[in-house]
Image: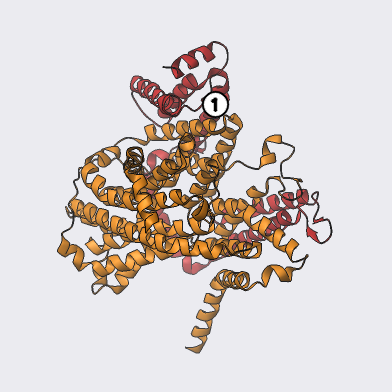
């Protein structure tokens, strides 16, 4: 945790300095005696900078506390407790090429979500959402594949029915031949 | 009284009643499934309500809100995993009751107490909100600025373990709200030359990303572990004598829950823990708490549902949300072209009283639907998250896109989702960020208008009596941790 706190503190400090620098380009005073658009963001960024510094030093204090001999026993106890927890989450704790499996899953799901938004414009809602759902279900460990395909397609139809048919709101149609396929499904 | 009858009349319309029933059932199911939360469902449903009239739209949203807070108790009792944060304290006695073969009784107690706590808070809401709105009509910009400061100071001090992290979330929210054209001078702020951001960071994609996408990523990331569910249960309602025996626990928890709900930043979770702690403190047998007793389920369940009505008081009367879920309702108000606050009581009376009536009926429906559909709710617990996760993301994408027909909104949603995930990883709470986004523009514009009125004197902003009292209270709240340390040091030195 102390490492995380120091990292977060430093990152917030850097962000706040960046925001303060940009805010200086905005007028701090507007007409006579009036507050300009730059004063509010500058003040907020300064508060954020203080928070960053406080968090950074908090992290250092935690390190000092952890190094004190009185707490060493507790640390050992915590390690034992953590071991038990780790056994319970064995699947998620599996390490592949130095990266935690759970983190790989998060990254994969995020990439798949980005893919959904990217391809929705090109191939339209029906194919992009069906493929996304299938791939995400598989990534999260759903089996068998055939059942996953069926569920993905059925759920996509369900969403199209709710949004397009019931509520009459627009969904991405795609371009070219995909546009025709999607429009056909939306009109069902 | 006429207005309340008007509200109840609105619910007699078949479509509106269907909405409150569907919202209530959906809320309970969503609340029961760990990883799906009430605020998440509300955020994703808001775009779907765009095509509806405002009354049924808000009816379904508040019904989900009330239902989900109870729903969390089902998984808390049956599988020792709270489906919703507000049900965390229910696991203390609910799960031991379940292990002793009293799962049905625990579920029944939870239903009755949630319902009673919720109904009590709605009555408090009906009595308090219009009075508070009357007072708020007299507020000028200085008072609104002070109110914003008070709200944010409470957010940063209550309901979270680390005040520093809550403050970071608040400031990040306020900074996000800065993005776009300045309301007074029209200057660009933090837009980085992107035309899309001239109108600011859109609220809907932001909350859907923060509450929907980030929840899925956290769940996948193993922050909360998944459990295989193999349980069967039916509900057994407690007898009148049993309820009479715990009447004071229920009454006190309802009061605590409503009061805590009114405070900005302290939602159902804090209310439930406070209700439980008070019940254990006041009990003749505090040692029995945690072993599976009815009071241990009744106290947190009454308090967490009582917080729902409480959280609506500042939202409807002042336009300041009292919890994360209430902040999401701000998004719904904006989407329907309405501004939450005292003017609602003048311009949108049927809607306001329709919301009151819907919340009251939704709390009654907790017992009716809970009792009738408990098997369905338990079945829903058995659907694996590998299906729910993708559905949540697909629904979030569909909702965000369809609201404004914009793929850029979907990218903002994903960005917000990643930000929310990172915040959870670093243990920074999400609700204060949303409250910062909502309160930021109100606070800034109020301050600048008050400054203008007082001819550029800070004196004129902080000295009006109400503003001054609110600011003093805010200062006291912000300094309270330091004061607490000083007092304990003083006491230690004396002893």
Q: Secondary structure at mark 1?
A: helix
Relative depth, front residue between B148 and B292: B148
Task: Give the chain letter at badge 1.
Answer: A
**Total count of labels:** 1
Q: Residue furthest top?
A: A177
Q: Residue B282: x and y, percent?
A: 29, 74
The image quadrant of residue A161 is top left
Chain B tint in image: orange
Q: Residue B288: x and y, percent?
A: 23, 67
Q: Residue at x 27, y 61 (%)?
A: B298
For the C terminus of chain A, the image quarter is top left
Q: Residue furthest bottom?
A: B494
For the rendered model, the colour scheme is by chain
The image quadrant of residue B11 is top left
B387 vs A175: above or below: below
Q: Residue B280: x and y, percent?
A: 30, 69
Q: Residue at x 24, y 40 (%)?
A: B230
Residue B170 in sight from this viewpoint: yes
For label 1, the crowd category at 10 Å Cα-Cα, with few meaning under 14, some 14 to 19 and many 20 or more, is: some
Q: Residue A128: x and y, percent?
A: 49, 22
| Left or right relative to B128: residue B366 | left
Relative depth, front residue between A173 and B364: B364
A49 vs B280: above or below: above
B446 vs B222: above or below: below
Residue B418 in sight from this viewpoint: no
Residue ID for mark 1: A115
Relative depth, front residue between A53 and B359: B359
Relative depth, front residue between A178 and B89: A178
| Left or right relative to B396: residue B465 | right
Q: Residue at x 40, y 57 (%)?
A: B309
Q: Which chain is red?
A: A
């Amino acid at each position: 945790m102390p490492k995380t706190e120091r990292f977060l503190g430093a990152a917030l400090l850097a962000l706040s300095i960046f925001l303060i620098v940009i805010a200086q380009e905005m007028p701090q005073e507007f007409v006579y005696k009036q507050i300009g658009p730059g004063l509010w963001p500058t003040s907020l960024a300064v508060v954020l900078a203080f928070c960053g510094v406080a968090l950074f030093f908090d992290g250092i204090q935690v390190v000092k506390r952890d190094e004190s001999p009185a707490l060493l026993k507790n640390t050992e106890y915590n390690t034992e407790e953590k071991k038990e927890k780790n056994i319970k989450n064995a699947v998620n704790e599996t390490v592949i090429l130095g990266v935690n499996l759970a983190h790989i899953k998060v990254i994969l799901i995020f990439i798949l979500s980005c893919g959904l938004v990217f391809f929705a414009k090109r191939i339209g809602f029906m194919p992009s959402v069906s493929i996304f759902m299938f791939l995400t279900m598989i990534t999260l460990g759903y089996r068998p594949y055939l059942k996953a395909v069926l569920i993905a397609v059925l759920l996509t139809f369900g969403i199209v029915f709710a949004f397009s048919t019931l509520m009459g709101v627009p969904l991405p149609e795609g371009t070219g031949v995909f546009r025709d396929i999607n429009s056909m499904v939306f009109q069902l | 009284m006429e207005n309340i009858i008007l509200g109840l009349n609105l619910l007699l319309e078949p479509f509106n009643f269907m909405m409150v029933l569907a919202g209530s059932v959906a809320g309970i199911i969503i609340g029961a499934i760990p990883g799906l939360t009430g605020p998440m469902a509300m955020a994703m449903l808001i775009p779907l309500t765009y095509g509806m009239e405002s009354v049924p739209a808000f009816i379904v949203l508040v019904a989900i809100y009330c239902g989900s807070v109870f729903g969390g108790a089902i998984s808390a009792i049956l599988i020792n995993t709270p489906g919703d944060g507000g049900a965390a304290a229910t696991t203390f006695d609910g799960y031991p009751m379940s292990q002793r073969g009293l799962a049905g009784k625990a579920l029944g107690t939870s239903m009755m107490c949630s319902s009673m706590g919720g109904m009590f808070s709605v009555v408090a809401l009906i009595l308090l909100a219009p009075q508070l709105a009357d007072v708020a009509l007299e507020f000028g910009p200085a008072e609104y600025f002070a109110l914003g400061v008070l709200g944010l100071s409470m957010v940063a001090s209550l309901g979270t373990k680390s005040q520093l992290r809550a403050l970071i979330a608040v400031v990040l929210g306020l900074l996000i709200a800065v993005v776009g054209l300045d309301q007074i001078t029209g200057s660009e702020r933090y837009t980085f030359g992107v035309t899309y951001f001239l109108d600011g960071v859109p609220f809907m994609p932001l909350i859907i990303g923060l509450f929907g996408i980030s929840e899925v990523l956290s769940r996948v990331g193993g922050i909360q572990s998944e459990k295989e569910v193999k349980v069967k249960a039916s509900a057994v309602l407690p007898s009148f004598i049993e309820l009479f025996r715990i009447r004071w626990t229920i009454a006190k928890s309802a009061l605590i829950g409503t009061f805590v709900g009114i405070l900005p930043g302290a939602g159902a979770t804090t209310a439930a823990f406070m209700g439980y702690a008070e019940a254990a403190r006041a009990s003749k047998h505090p040692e029995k708490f945690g072993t599976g007793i009815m009071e241990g389920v009744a106290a947190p369940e009454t308090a967490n549902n009582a917080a729902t009505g409480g959280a609506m008081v500042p939202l409807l009367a002042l336009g300041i949300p009292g919890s994360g879920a209430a902040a999401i309702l701000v998004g719904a108000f904006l989407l329907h072209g309405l501004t939450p606050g005292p003017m609602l009581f003048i311009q949108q009376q049927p809607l306001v009283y329709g919301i009151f009536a819907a919340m009251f009926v939704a709390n009654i429906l907790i017992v009716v639907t809970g009792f009738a559909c408990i098997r369905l709710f338990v079945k829903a617990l058995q659907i694996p998250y590998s299906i729910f996760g993708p559905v949540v993301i697909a629904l979030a994408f569909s909702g965000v896109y369809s609201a404004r027909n914009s793929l850029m909104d979907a990218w903002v949603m994903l960005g917000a989702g990643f930000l929310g995930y990172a915040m959870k990883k670093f243990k920074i709470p999400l609700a204060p960020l949303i409250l910062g986004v909502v309160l930021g523009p109100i606070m800034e514009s109020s301050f600048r208008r008050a400054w203008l009125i007082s001819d550029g004197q800070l004196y004129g902003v902080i000295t009006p009596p109400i503003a001054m009292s609110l600011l003093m209270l805010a200062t006291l709240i912000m300094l309270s941790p330091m004061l607490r340390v000083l007092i304990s040091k003083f006491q230690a030195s004396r002893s």
